[in-house]
Image: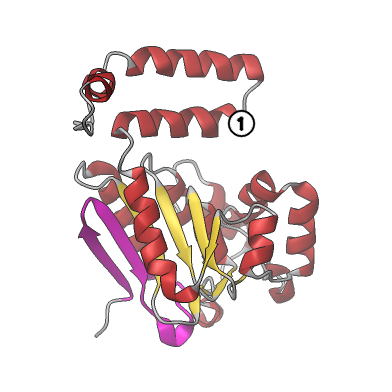
C-alpha cells in the first residue's frame, strides 16, 4: 500500500510529499496526525535545516481536507467540536508546522485550496507555478477556514483582499498570488522542484541559530508595539553574540572562506 505521506532527507533538507494524487492530495485525519509527528521530528533533528512541502502528481499541492472522510465520520455536537478546536494545548498540523523554528517552504503545483492553502500559509515561504489554483473556498461548502486561514491570510495579503478571497471562495492563479503577496515566487511547472531545491540551498547559507532568532523576532514582533519589538530584537541580538556561529561568521569573512556553521 502506498504511503499517503513520503518523508525524505537529502542534504540537510527534509522533503514532505503529500502522496494521494488520485484524490488531489486531500488530507485525511491520519495524515494530519502524521504531519504533526513530522513537524516534531524536524524540530528535534539538528541534521535537518530546511523543510519543503510538496504534492505528488501534476494536478495538486493539496485540495484540503478529505470531505468524503469528514462526511462519513462520527457526528459531534457544536460544543464538542469547538472544544476539540480550541482546547488548551491542542495541536493541529498547521499549528505544528507554524511552530517549526527552521525555515519551511511550500512548493505549490495545481490546486492549493482549503486546508491545503492553510498548510502552505503555515510555512514561511510559498513557491507556485503560473497555472496554480489557490484559495480558501470553504464558504462554498458551508464551512469556514478553520486551520488558520482567516488569521494568516490577512497578515499576508491585507484584510480587504482576504475578505474578498474568503467570502467569494475565488481561486487565483500563481501570477495573481504573487501580485498580492500570497506567494514569494512563480516558476514554470517543470522547474518547481528545482526552484524549491535552490531556494532551500540558499537558506542553508545562513547560520541556524541566527535564522531561528530572526523568525522569532519577525513573527512575534508583528504582534507587538514598535517599542516592544525593538526590545525583543535587542535581547535576541545580545544572545546571538554569545554563540560560536557569531564568532565564525566574521572570522570566515575575514579569511575569505565560506563559514562552517555549528548551530550553537
Q: Is residue 110 left or right of residue 42?
A: right
For residue 28, say whether it is visible: no
Quarter of the picture containing the N terminus is bottom left
Q: Quadrant of residue 54?
A: bottom left
Residue 87, can we see it? yes
Question: How many labels sit on residues?
Answer: 1
Binning the other alpha carbons within 10 Å of mark 1 as few (below 14), some (14 to 19) or many (20 upward) gives few
Residue sitting farthest toward the front: 256
Any magenta on residue 138?
A: no
Is 248 rendered above or below residue 36? above
Residue 67 x %, y %: 55, 78
87 horizontally vs 131: left or right = left
Residue shown at 37% from the left, 65% from the top: 194
The type of colouring in the image is secondary structure
Q: Quadrant of the C terminus?
A: top left
Q: Which of 261 and 138 lies nearest the eye of the viewer?
A: 261
Q: Report the residue at 22% width, 31% height from top.
A: 259
Report which quarter residue 10 is drawn in. Answer: bottom left
Image coordinates of residue 9 in percent, x first then y, are 22, 58
Dot 1: element:
loop
Q: Is residue 172 left or right of residue 201?
A: right
The residue indicated by pointer 1 is 222
| Residue 147 placement (x, y as % from top left) | 56, 56
Question: Magenta span covers which residues?
Answer: 4-32
Which one is nearer the viewer's eye here, 82 or 141? 141
Residue 160: x, y in percent? Answer: 80, 51
Q: Is residue 11 magenta?
A: yes
Q: Quadrant of residue 149?
A: bottom right
Between 89 and 208, the one nearer to me in the picture: 208
Residue under the image location 44 percent in, 13 percent down: 235
Amino acid at each position: 500500500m502506498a504511503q499517503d505521506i513520503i518523508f525524505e532527507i537529502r542534504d540537510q533538507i527534509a522533503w514532505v510529499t503529500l502522496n494521494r494524487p488520485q484524490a488531489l492530495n486531500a488530507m485525511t485525519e491520519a495524515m494530519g496526525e502524521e504531519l504533526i509527528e513530522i513537524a516534531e521530528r524536524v524540530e528535534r533533528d539538528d541534521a535537518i535545516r530546511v523543510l519543503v512541502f510538496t504534492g505528488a502528481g501534476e494536478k495538486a499541492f493539496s485540495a484540503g481536507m478529505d470531505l468524503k472522510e469528514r462526511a462519513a465520520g462520527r457526528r459531534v455536537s457544536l460544543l464538542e467540536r469547538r472544544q476539540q478546536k480550541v482546547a488548551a494545548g491542542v495541536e493541529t498540523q498547521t499549528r505544528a508546522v507554524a511552530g517549526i523554528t527552521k525555515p519551511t517552504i511550500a512548493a505549490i503545483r495545481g490546486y492549493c485550496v482549503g486546508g491545503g492553502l492553510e498548510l502552505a500559509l503555515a510555512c514561511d515561504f510559498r513557491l507556485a507555478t503560473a497555472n496554480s489554483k489557490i484559495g480558501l473556498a470553504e464558504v462554498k461548502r458551508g464551512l469556514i477556514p478553520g486551520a488558520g486561514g482567516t488569521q494568516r491570510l490577512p497578515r499576508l495579503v491585507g484584510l480587504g483582499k482576504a475578505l474578498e478571497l474568503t467570502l467569494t471562495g475565488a481561486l487565483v492563479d500563481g501570477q495573481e498570488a504573487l501580485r498580492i503577496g500570497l506567494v514569494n515566487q512563480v516558476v514554470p511547472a517543470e522547474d518547481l522542484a528545482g526552484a524549491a531545491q535552490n531556494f532551500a540551498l540558499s537558506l542553508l547559507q545562513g547560520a541556524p541559530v541566527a535564522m531561528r532568532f530572526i523568525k522569532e523576532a519577525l513573527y512575534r514582533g508583528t504582534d507587538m508595539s514598535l517599542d516592544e519589538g525593538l526590545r525583543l530584537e535587542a535581547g535576541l541580538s545580545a544572545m546571538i553574540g554569545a554563540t560560536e556561529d557569531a564568532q565564525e561568521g566574521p572570522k570566515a569573512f575575514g579569511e575569505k572562506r565560506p563559514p562552517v556553521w555549528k548551530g550553537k
